[in-house]
Amino acid sequence: MSVMDNYILQVHGLQVTFTDIERNEIHVVDGVSFSIKQGETLALVGESGCGKSVTSLALLRLLDGNGRIRGGNVLWQGRDILSLPLREVRSLRGREIAMVFQEPSSALNPVYTIGDQITESMLRHQKVSPAQAKKQAEEMLRLVGIPEPRKRLEEYPHALSGGMKQRAMIAMALSCRPRLLIADEPTTSLDVTIQAQILELIKELQKRFHMAILLITHDLGIVANMADRILIMYAGKVVEEGNKQDIFRRAAHPYTRGLLNSIPRMDQAKGTFASIPGTVPDPAHFPEGCRFHNRCGEFTETCLSEPGKIHLENEHFVLCHYPLGQKTLGCRAK
Amino acid sequence: MTSERRQLIRRLFLSTSGFLGFSLLAFFCIVALCAPWLAPPPAGRDPYLMPVVEWSPNPQPPSSEYIFGVAGKRNIYYGVIWGTRSAFRVGITVTVISTMFGLLVGAVGGYFGKIVDEVLMRITDIFLAIPFLVAAVVMATILGPGLDNVIRALIFFSWMFPARLIRGNILQIKEEQYITAARSVGVNHVGIIVRHVLPNSIFPVLIQASMRMGSLVITAAALSFLGIGARENYADWGGLLNYARNWMLGGGGEVLRYWYMVVFPGAAMVLFVLAWNLVGDALRDVFDPRLKV
């Protein structure tokens, strides 16, 4: 963390709560901190319900309903998004920070053409005429690999296939050349072959536009392929942080290791798949102390107290009383 | 896309109910537009005031001169023709204004939720709790006679229906991911409501509005019939029925002796309501996704 200027986004101690029907506050995201450098890909990894998506929505203050940001700050080039007036946050959305969503078929509005939707953010953020915007939109569609872009501009979302829709979503997100792209499980709903294409596309566009990516996923295969640095989340907290090598070769948190061990491998002996026993705890009843203790093989009495963040090496941090040894791990990066 | 749209329009007009409804509506439109030629008003007089054609207060049956007969010294034919304009005026003004107001209340409540929704919906509940006709009668009496006051009274007590409907739809639509997606590119609240939420939730409201159009005209006629609607002798279907009040039970041993006083304005009303209901039905058939095969 020496050169602070390098970071375009810094999140410190983000707290998000939801209110349940009995008006109890539930801490879904509890003190999450991370930062993203210009042009890098940071992967946010965790099981369903660990707070990944909520974190990503909170960054742009997009939480609605009963989700509330209770603390922390989100510094975008030195300015705290969480305390900016909403009008200025809006001008950041889409222009500087854009999002791609999980489900392309529900993230596109069925009553507007693809062209309308791509030009919407351009017309909002840039001084362009509708005709110019349309031209740029066509260019964007060509860039994301959609054939016959001019024709596609006039089509409605239902006329496109899932992969095409996701390409159109990407074109939409990148239409204003954002500096950070938040991709929330961008390929989960796509076929494996299409997944690979979309990921390649995102990588290619990242290089071209020199933007940073916050990739939210539960798929470690994608992480290995895309990420520079990795953040492992469990039950609303970041439990381990490190670069790809740190995580895949020297995972220190028992949870991270559990995740890595549960990837089926070709050279594995026959038998049952490894898995982490138990399920993700309900956010209303997170365990005391280390939130992983009830599923952890290394559990001792100490784990009932809150673990502190341990600095292992360079950029490798872990939130655990008993970080695992650095050499014994047999898991490897893809 | 255009072919799809063309098909939609074809389905709209070529279904039985759509064809009948739109034809009837077109007929009424033509009558309203051509009123000055169909029933020329006396020169220099307000055409909406039915001129006196007879000095005897007794009704007269249809004749070659007065094809629908004479009631209250006025030509029923003249009243029916010019009354078409009054019907459109009441129906369209009330429906448009009450729907717009209802949309505003329902959209704001549904979209912003929480306390805003709570307050707006409780106010809506209060209005809904008052029986519609009674409320309209009281309001029209307070405001005094005149078509404009009828319109005001009806608007005042009919905005709740679209408000409720649109609120429900918005609650459903606002959870969609494309709403979050639109917010994520920096669209503001007004843009979200107007550009993204309403187009996805407005059709049921339009269908309901067209169906309500007919019943509003009936209510307006009821007020006129009771003598608290349009001014006396104003060309209005309900007003024509008002003339029939003392003659409805017939006379001289014949119950149906003065049938023409009720039948002609009544038929106009029935067909007008039917037209709007059929149009509403046709719209629903075409736009309601649940009915799509």
Image (cartoon, helix red, strand yellow):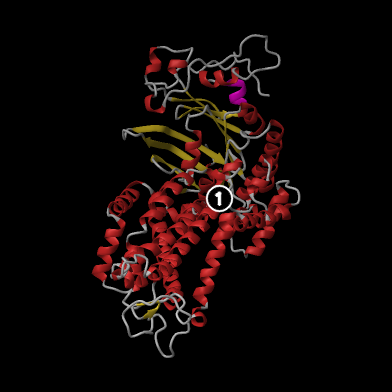
Q: Indicate the position of residue B110 as horizontal and vertical percent values.
A: 40, 49
- The reply, left or right, for residue A16 in relation to residue B176 is left
Q: At numbered mark 1, what does the secondary structure look like: helix, strand or loop? A: helix
Q: Is residue A222 visible?
A: yes
Of A160 and B132, the residue lying toward us: B132
Compared to residue B59, the image places residue A116 above or below, namely above
The magenta segment: A245-251
Of helix, strand and loop, which mostly describes the magenta segment? helix
Q: Check the image and name the residue furthest to the front.
A: B253
- Which corner quadrant of the image does residue A270 belong to? top right
Q: Indicate the position of residue B136 as horizontal and vertical percent values.
A: 29, 62
Q: Amino acid type of disc 1?
A: Asp
- Which corner quadrant of the image does residue B238 belong to? bottom left
Q: Check the image and name the residue furthest to the bottom.
A: B44
Compared to residue A334, the image places residue A186 above or below, namely below
Q: Check the image and name the residue furthest to the right.
A: A148
Q: Indicate the position of residue B3 as horizontal and vertical percent values.
A: 69, 55
Of A254 and A120, the residue lying toward us: A120
Compared to residue A109, the image places residue A25 above or below, namely above
Q: Please name the residue shown 62% across and 50% down the image.
A: A172
Q: Indicate the position of residue B57 as horizontal and vertical percent values.
A: 31, 80
Of B34 and B197, the residue lying toward us: B34
Q: Please name the residue shown 32% across and 73% down the image.
A: B243
- Which corner quadrant of the image does residue A166 belong to? top right
Q: How many numbered markers are drawn?
A: 1
How crowded is the residue under tag 1: few (<14 C-alpha within 10 Å), some, or many (20+)? some
Residue A78 in magenta?
Answer: no
Q: Please name the residue shown 51% across and 74% down the image.
A: B31
Tag 1 subunit: B
Residue that label 1 marks: B285
